[in-house]
Amino acid sequence: MSERYTTYSELKDQYRAIDKTIKYLDERMDDIKKFYEGSSSARLIFLGCGSSYSIAKSGALIAKSKLN
């Protein structure tokens, strides 16, 4: 398939993007935990639909496992 299609290029680039995101979050995990622990809120809310919905569900699951 031609590289002129943005969606195709983005799909091919997902592994690099996910790896970059994981590294970004790992580098900031202490700050994220401090923010969460210092908050008076009892929960985080992730919103999304379609592909964003799947990402939000994954993010919520990861946040729950990392922050508990």
Image: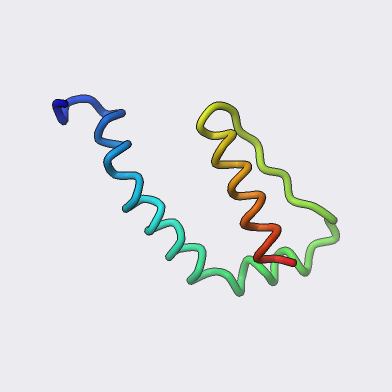
Compared with 16, 53 (above or below) is: above
Residue 60 picture location, percent across and down: 66, 49
- Asked which quadrant contains residue 68, the reply is bottom right
Residue furthest bottom in the image: 30
Count of number-bearing discs = 0
> What residue appears at the point 43 percent right and 65 percent down from the top-left corner?
23
15 and 30: which is toward the camera: 15
Residue 46 picture location, percent across and down: 67, 42
Residue 26 picture location, percent across and down: 50, 69
46 sits to left or right of 28? right
- Asked which quadrant contains residue 40, the reply is bottom right
Compared with 24, 46 (above or below) is: above
9 sits to left or right of 37? left
> What residue appears at the point 16 percent right and 30 percent down from the top-left corner?
3
What colouring style does the render use? rainbow
- Asked which quadrant contains residue 1, the reply is top left
> What residue appears at the point 36 percent right and 50 percent down from the top-left corner?
17
> What residue appears at the point 65 percent right and 57 percent down from the top-left corner?
63
Residue furthest left in the image: 2
Residue 8 picture location, percent across and down: 26, 30
